[in-house]
Image: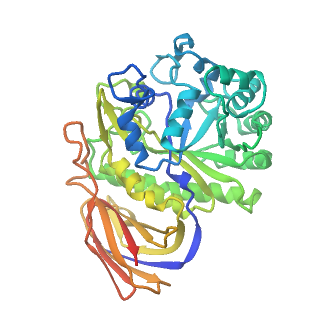
Amino acid sequence: MKANAIIQTDVVKATINRNIYGHFAEHLGRCIYEGLWVGEDSPIPNTQGIRSDVLEALKRLNVPVLRWPGGCFADEYHWKDGVGPRKQRKRMVNTHWGGVVENNHFGTHEFMLLCELLGCEPYISGNVGSGTVQEMQEWVEYMTFDGESPMADWRRQNGRAEPWKLTYFGVGNENWGCGGNMRPEYYADLYRHYQTYVRNYGGNKIYRIACGANSGDYRWTEVLMREAARFMDGLSLHYYTVPGPTWQEKGSATEFTEQDWFTTLKKTLFMDELIAKHAAIMDQYDPERRIGLIVDEWGTWYDVEPGTNPGFLYQQNTLRDALVAGVNLHIFHKHASRVKMANIAQTVNVLQAMVLTEGAKMVLTPTYHVFEMFKVHQGGEALDVHLKSDDYEFGGERIPQVSLSASRDAEGRIHISLCNLHHEAAADLSVQLRGLTDNRRVSGRLLTGPSIQAHNTFAQPDAVHPVPFDGAAVAGGVLTAQLPARSVAVLTLEA
C-alpha cells in the first residue's frame, strides 16, 4: 500500500503552540493521590510529597501546561479547603468519582509546586457549578496579588511570600453537564458575570477560558461566541474516543478485535471534522482568530480494568492508544491557527494516561512514548503538507491508511511524524520535499509492537517502546520510507 505526499518546506501554515501537548490531572481515582502525590512521609521516594519517579518521567515530556483540579471535580471543589496546615484541612466526599473521601492534602500550594518542578504553566479550572463569584475572585487574588489584602496575607501565612504567575484560568467545566446542566444562554450570562472578577493583578495577565461544547453541540459554540466572545480568550471543546456502541459498553482497553481497532481510529479521526465545524462558527464572530480553541479533554475512554473501582476510570493503554494520540496531535497541528491548547485526559492512572503506577512501581505507556517522540514539534512551524494515502478498508468502511505532519524547529531541522493506521499492512511512503535547497540526512525513531493489543505491564514494562528507525532515505529531494503496520514514526531531516 502506498502514500504520496508533498511537503512545502518553505511554506509555513502556523506555529504549533506548545500547549497543544498539554496534560490534565483531576482529583479522580489514583491520578492525584498515589499517582502524583504521596506525601513527604511516604516510603515511595518523593520531592516535597510529589512522587519522584513520575515527576522525572513527566519532565522528559517537556510538559508545557497542566490543567487542574478537574473535570467534574472542579465544580464541586472549594479551594479554601485545600490550603493551610494539611491536618486541619476539611475532608469532603468526591461525589463524582467513586464516593471516596478527599482529604484536600493536595491543594493550591501543592499544585503550583508541581508545576514549578515540571517547569510548566498552571491551568486552573474555577468552580462555577457550586461556587460563588466571591470564591473565584478570592482564589485569583490569593494566587496572584502582590499587595496587602486578606487573601494575599493568607497566602503569606501559608508559606508563600511571592505571588505565583497564573496565565490560564477556566471559568467552569462542562457546565452543560456535570457542571450544572445549564443551557448555553444561561451559562453565557454566568460566564460574563464570573469572568469579570477574574482580575489581572500587577503584571499577571490571565487568559480566560470559557466552557465550550460537548463534542458536536455546535449550537453551544454559536451562543457562546454570539453572547460572550469579547469577554473570552479561549473556548473549550471536549471529545472522547469511545469505540463501544454506548457509554455503558465502551469496550475493553486490551481485549479487542481488529474491527474494534478500526472503529476506534475512525472515531478518532472525527476530531478533524469537529474542530473544523466549531472553528467555522468561531470565525464568524472572531475572523482574526484572537480566541483560541482549547481542546482541554480528549483521548480514549474504555471500560475500567476488571476488579477496579468503576469510579476510578483506570484503564490499560495499548499500541491502539499510541495511534490515537498520534492522529489527534496531527489534527491539532493541522488546525494550529485556531487550536491553542489541548489537554489529554489524564496524566496518571486515569483514562489515556502517560504513566501507570502500582504501589512503588511505575510503567510508561505507549501514549507516553508518542508524546516523548512528538515533543520535537512543540513550538515548531507547521509546514504545508499535501498527502494522498491509499485507504485502509475494513468491514466495508474506509479511512486513510497514513497520517502525516511536518514542522521546522528553531534550528532549521524538519521533523516529520507518521502514523500507519493499518493493523497488518506496511505503507510505502514517498514525500517530495519542495523548497529544500540543501542536502539533508535523515534519522528516525519507530514505535510499534507484535500485535494490536501490545502494551506495557509492571512485569513487562518495555514491551512497547521506541527504537531507532533506519528505513528512510533522502535522495534528489524525495524522502522514501517503508512504515511497518500499526506504527508511529518520527523522522528528522538535518543538514
Which residue lies most toward the bottom here?
476
Q: Position of residue 87 (x, y in %)?
A: 52, 11
Residue at figure coordinates x 30%, y 51% from the top left: 319
Q: How many marks?
A: 0
Q: Position of residue 477 (x, y in %)?
A: 40, 86
Which residue lies most toward the top here?
88
The N terminus appears in which quarter of the rendering?
A: bottom left
> Viewed as shown, does residue 297 lie left or right of 375?
right
> Viewed as shown, does residue 414 lie left or right of 426?
right
Instruction: Using the image as rendered, state which of residue 333 and residue 199 is in the foreground.
Output: 199
Instruction: Using the image as rendered, state which of residue 318 and residue 89 is in the foreground.
Output: 89
Q: Position of residue 346 (x, y in %)?
A: 45, 39
Residue 354 appears in the rendering? no
Against 17, residue 430 (above or below) is below
The C terminus appears in which quarter of the rendering?
A: bottom left
> Viewed as shown, does residue 258 lie left or right of 388?
left
